Amino acid sequence: KQVQPQTSIKASITGTDADLIIVLFGDTSSVESGTKNILINQDEHTEFSSKLYDLCGRHIYVINLIGLRDIKEITLDKGINAFLLLISYGHHVSQYKSGLQWLEKTFGRGAIYYLMTVLTHNSGEKYEDAFKDLKVCDSFVEKRYHTCTRSMSVSEEIAELLLKIQAMESDSNPSCFTGLICGGNKEQSKSDGVPTVALQHKSQKDLDKIVQNSQHQRETQTLLTRLQLQDEYPRKMSPGKFLQVGPPLKLHQDTSEKDLAYYFLHRLIMLDYRARYIPVEQDSLNVTCSKPVLDSDGNDSDESDLESFMSAGVGTNQPSQTHVHPMDVQMAVFHCSDNFLRQIMITKLSQCQYALPLLVPDPFTAEIECPLWAFRQITKTWKKTKGDSQATMKNIPICKAETPLVSFFRLGSLSVSKSQLMNSLINDRHSTFFHRHCPGSTKTRLLLDGVAEITWYCPAGKPGDAFNNCIAFCNLHGDAVMIEKQRDILMEKSSVNVVMVPNLQKDDGSRKIISALWKSKKPLICLLVDDDGAVESRKGKYKMGLKARNQADVSVELKRIIQGLLSSEDPSILKTTFQLETMMENSEIKVDESDNACQNGKSAAVTITNLFQNRDVSSIKDDFLSYQGHLWLKWCKANKELHRLTGNIENDKSKKERELTRIRGQQCDISCSELMRLFTKNLFILPPKDKEYFLKWTQILTDALSADCISSILQSYDNKWSEVMALRNNHDKSKHLEKMETELELLSKKLQSATFGLEHIFREMGQIYEAHKTKHGDNKSGNWCSYPKLAADLLISGHPLELLDGDAGHVPLRWISSVFDEVIRKLGDLKVFVLSVLGLQSSGKSTMMNSMFGLQFAVSAGRCTKGAFMQLVKMTEEVKKDIKFDYLLVVDTEGLRALELESTTLQHDNELATFVVGVGNMTLINIFGENPAEMQDILQIVVQASMRMKKIRLSPSCVFVHQNVTDVAAAEKNMDGRRRLQEKLDQMTQLAAKEEDCSSNCFGDVITFNIETDVKYFAQLWEGSPPMAPPNPGYSESIQELKAHILSKASASNGISLSHLKVHIQDLWDALLNENFVFSFKNTQEIAEYRKLEAEYGNWTWAIRDNLLTIENQLYNRIENGDLNQLESSSISTETSKAYEEIEEAMIRYFEEEKNKETLVQWRGRFECKLKEFHDEQVGTVKRKLDGVIRQKSARKMMDDMKTEFENKLLQKSKDIAQNFKNKSKEEAELQQAFNTDWKIWVNELTKNTKPLEDIELDNDLFVILKEIGMEEKLIKECKESGTYKDISKTDKYVDYINILKKKAVLKQYFKTPKASSVDQIQIKQIIDIVAKESVDTIKKKPVATRGYQSTYLHEMVHFIKENVAMLESELKYAFVKKFTVDLVLYVFDLVKSWLLESQQKFKLDNDALCYLESRKMHYYNIFQICCKGSSSVVVLGELICEKLRPSIAEAAYTKTALALARDMKCNVPAFSGNRLNLEKHVLRSLAEREEFEEFIVYFQNPREQIEAFITAEVQRYIDTGHNKAEIILQQNVEDIYTVVSQALCTATEKVKIQRGDINAWLSELSLLMKDQLKFDSASFKDFSDIHDFDFLSKETDEKLKSVKEQISSFSVHEMKKSRETPEQILIDQLCRCCWVKCPFCSAVCTNTLEDHSPDDHSVPFHRSCSLSGMYHANTRVMYINFCTSDVSSDRTFLPNRESKRAFPYKEYRKAGPEFKSWRITPDESKLPYWKWVVCRFRSNLEKYYGLKFEGLGKIPENWKEIRKEEAIKSLDEMCQ
């Protein structure tokens, strides 16, 4: 029978004999009705469908509700077998969801269990993808899915559908839907809706129970709807939905019912046990509430009011619906939570000291479930005592704990609360079990009856403990008479059963239960509520009346009985223990861990932990996690050393880099352990849910391993410590004590090794990746390439990831960067807000973060957090409206001042704190108590380190959180303390800024902090004494307030993108690695004192060095004079003993009399040793130097004696070897090879008794010296790398070198801005030039070329520079930053370095035998070549003579050429042909033509430098444009010299022939003839006695000289510069030897030609505008443009210098000081237009350079601007008229 679609329907189906009843519903578009439609036949008028009967032979009743939206009423006498939801392809998802909602709304949630989904489609249409879409939808079941054409005319399709319905019928229990559904939620009678055929075998009691269950289901559904959880049942809520950062909770406002579940969970996560007692706002008329009493209107009499008040009852007209019971909220959330959220929920309930659900009946199926998985993360700690023996500590996962179980049952209805009585046994100040008197309790509760809750009493090992061991207490809610299954399970598991009954009546329904318990051997306690009898006992069975008894007395008595039963030795009493894991053995209980995904995850985790069987936990990391073992620690140490190199930096750097590569290679050579292979394999292959279980199981199982091991080690440690203390107390100093102490230390190390958890496995993944990435680069072969992707998935899903390795104290940058790259790839480059936390160990940091955001940071079992972990927390959409980032990145860190790291804790803590503060947008400074002293020290280091890491732009902020503050008025009472905190922080910031040359004035300049709002006070965490104390609600309120404050501050931040955060972490860590100095100190004050001590130490060492230098010079002279040939160290020590003793006394006085001597005392011993070592080292150095001088003197004497012998031997050997090659055709390469082979042999033979001179390392020496004077290694490196020192003499930004904080108050009257004035700029530059010149001159006076280099020369230079900088500071009244001194030293060093190296090389050539011989190698090779060609001795000697004369001829020719060029230019170049004034005119003309401002500035500040540059340029121009004039002069000079030599050859030959002399006489005569022209030493030519043909010799030599002449005649500027004189130097010496004193007003240079023209005054024909020298109007920034020649005739006054308080009249300028007195400035109104043009042309340049303005009084006159350059240049001619 078919019912046609309508807008509403009211139907009754009764008395039908249908075999099958089907309801069709859905959208009208999903089906085509018509005669061919088998399922819906419009023309059918019979009761049943004939087409369906023909198809299957069954009477099928079809109800067509397709398109229907409203149902008035359907009354059923038969159950509905199937609901067919018809959906059309293309709209299948939306129609499925809307159809599901309609079905649930119309027929109730139970109808979904009888749902069949039918997808309809057009014939030939492809619809396969619809199945994938529907699979993800809620309540979709694959085997209850069917497809057919929209016409429903294919009989095979309909037949298959009917078969699926039949299968569903068989699976369903009951086989049909029996609920009577009404549009208005009407209740059905007990007989309604129940099929007659299904009730024939049911009793009336069973029928009542069925109806009752149906009613309970509907009420449960209503409850879920009221709590807005209808879409979350069953188990659809996951942690991801709740563990997001949402808006702050309003703790003290009533909550609407729909938000109850949300508020409950979030307050529970915050450890607020008041989550059970959330007040509900009265926003519904259907909710029960008390009615307000109305005031009388005044007309009623008092009697009537009284009568009304005294009436027998109160109004009963209450609404039907009451408040939701608090436990119904808890259980509803529990039922709607998935296993992971349940685990969090149960863990938090346990921390709140609440009872936990052990047995939970399903509200719809009544199936009993034990949430064992939810208990897995709970670990309980207690101390067991037995008699007077020492307490034994236990720390066990609660699932594995074997404890007695005491179960309480209520039989019948009682007037006494069982739960309240149980609370008095466990904790009488806390409602562990919810009872009827708790706030919010109502008489009606839906989900608590039948629930068995459990809790554990954990003793603290104190006399006041209720029990001496851990006991589990279980409470079955509801009437145990009715709750059979749970009752029987608990009675079986219990050690003691406690039943509460009204009394023991024979006809009572509870008698059967008590009888069974009586017969059991287990102890039984009967509490009779309505009896007042005393306690009776018999064989472990107790009976006690409660009537008229105080509950406290009952509690005490009950504790005594339970304790007695559990400790009884009576064999007749059955003693059992309870273990939570044994609940899995009961087949009547469904355990959540039986879930397939959970079992899969557990199986994979167990496979891993099975690897650890029979192994010591402390060795697991060494055996299975080798990558993070000693090699990783070694790599970290080497990497830190690489960033903190000293000494020979480049060599050490290369060595360290090779070492790092080698270690990474060793890591890669280690095969991946079975543990890591299995772990990563599971991460790759397991489905997401299985993977989540796998990770949890792995964490649980590994933590359990560690907990067992740690507990055992702690017990051993405790025993061993007791033995050691006993020996110490007995003053036992035997070897036995040493042995015991060694064993104790080994136990301590073993305890550290035993901490093994999931975080170590993740760390190993990171190390495997780091090692292979370093070795293989981007060669992506192997599973390791995918590790970052796995880690990114886990980080996104809410798992913490280790950011800083807690064991190595190192950030694995490659690993972290790659993980971030993967996160960016998955989420996009989102913005995050980084929140970090910092505090002392065990101060509650992790607890605070976990409570605030529901996090679970990786913490190994049995200890605190180690290292730093980061976790991503998503922001809710509601919060994201007010902020600019998507995620919160929380960074949790290990505690500072950890005792186990005592040896390295200072350095470690300071590095960690700086990193944590630097990486965070905000850092929570967690302080236990009200005193921030410990954290102050650490923060000082953080601030100073932040200042030093200038390349990293840090902008952190902080909030101080004081935990465990009991006083509610702490904030008010600590106002003065906070003020002092602010002052302390500011003081230490200023001190740090002073040390680091920074401009920060207060703490907030470095780390954003507001003393008024950024200090929070937390109540203590526990409300009482652990382990049974619940958390303090005030703590949760503080958590919520802090969270609101964080979000408020974060809303003003832009956050940081993930890509920028990745780079920021890299930069920050690199900066930390490069920083080493400050981390070794406790606080900023210590750093300041240490630096002062270093400065003093530098003075002491310089005094020692200076004294030894004097002694060295004295001894050197003795050695050179031949008075000292042997030296002892003792003689040097004796010489310096007096000075050393004085220095030692100065050191002692410093340590004993200095203001902060308490701080200094820690370094006294070290510096005393260092000073002695330095003294001994310097004495040894002096001895080695002087011993070297003695050896070198002997070597020089020997060498002088042997030179002739060397020469003769080498010459002879060259000839001898050449004889072997004579007349043989040999290639050049063969000749060279043969010569080189024998040359090495000769040289080794000749130098075997001499020691070579060592090379010098100037850069390293300077580096050491700078460190000795207090400059830090990092600063020196930065200055060298930046290269700014190279331009220190040219820059116009000396303000960068000025320390603003150190300026003295006197500056304020001169400057409005913190810029150096023009006068200062000039003075600084002059000092730089003077220091550079004097340093270079001083160094060049050192006898390096004759005595060799000594590092003392650089010491003198550095100290000279340092003294001049100090003098400049005192003159300018402000200080320079350290960078100025370092840059100036490096600048001067650059100037002298090449000279020192050249001089040392010259010394080496003159004093090192090997160098001397090597310098002669080419000479003898030439002889060798000549001899090889068969040439005679005459040819050889002629060649040697020409080779000897070649450099001498070149030098003489170029020197003569230079003099000729200078003479020619002096006559013919206009600039050089006049006087000094003429030269000045041409220099100024050149400057104007070039128009280069920098050249003008050089002229103003150092005119001699500019004029010398002009002369050099003019000479070069003259040579370049002289039409080969220089070459013509050179050729003439060479020809003249050749003529002299040629004539000398002829003359010597004729004279020797006449005198019949030998070759020696000929050579001597030749040398004598050329002595005035050339250098020629005849003694160097030996072994040519066989030469007698002097005419041939003269002719051969003359021929070879012609070749030399041709070679030299080609002019070379390079050769010119190597000559003794150059034309530019000749002209400079001539033209610049004059007066260079500058006018004190305008800086014009005196033009007197004489250098010292005293007593004549300085003068100049034309002065300049004073603005060109940077002169300005006092107390302004305005240029002074006047000419001093005009001022001296005016009535104006001037200040001689900035410090002068007296103004002098210009007319009396000579009285202003010596520099003014020596000048004659003639009043003159004729001003050179040239300088006016310069002012106008370079106006903006001058303003920028001097920091002044041409405005107001300094405004440039208009007529100046009219002067053109040509006029300006022409006006220069006036200078010489």
Image (spheres, rainbow, N blue to C red):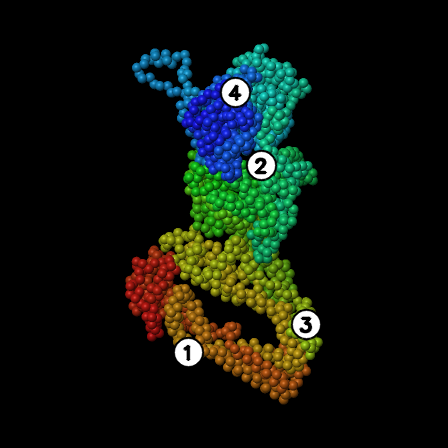
**Mark before the other along the chain sequence, 4 or 2:** 4
Q: Amino acid at mark 2?
A: Asp
Element type where label 4 sits in the image: loop
Q: Tell me the distance, in whole angstroms, between the alpha carbons under discs 1 and 4.
A: 140 Å
**Disc marking residue 17:** 4
The residue lying toward the viewer, choosing from 1405 and 205, is 205
The residue carrying mark 2 is 690
Q: Tell me the distance, in whole angstroms, between the alpha carbons under discs 3 and 2.
A: 80 Å
Element type where label 3 sits in the image: helix
**Mark before the other along the chain sequence, 4 or 3:** 4
**Mark before the other along the chain sequence, 1 or 3:** 3
- Callout 2 environment at 10 Å: few (<14), some (14 to 19), or many (20+)? many
| Labels 2, 1: front one | 2
**Mark before the other along the chain sequence, 1 or 4:** 4
For image coordinates 62% across by 14% down, the residue present is 515
The residue carrying mark 3 is 1234
In this rendering, does residue 607 appear at all? yes
The residue lying toward the viewer, choosing from 314 and 238, is 238
* Image quarter of the C terminus: bottom left
Q: Amino acid at mark 1?
A: Asn
View extreme (bottom): residue: 1554
Measuring from the top left, give residue 356's x and y in whole percent: 55, 27
Asked whether the beta carbons under mark 2 and mark 1 sit within 8 Å of each other, the answer is: no
The residue carrying mark 1 is 1468
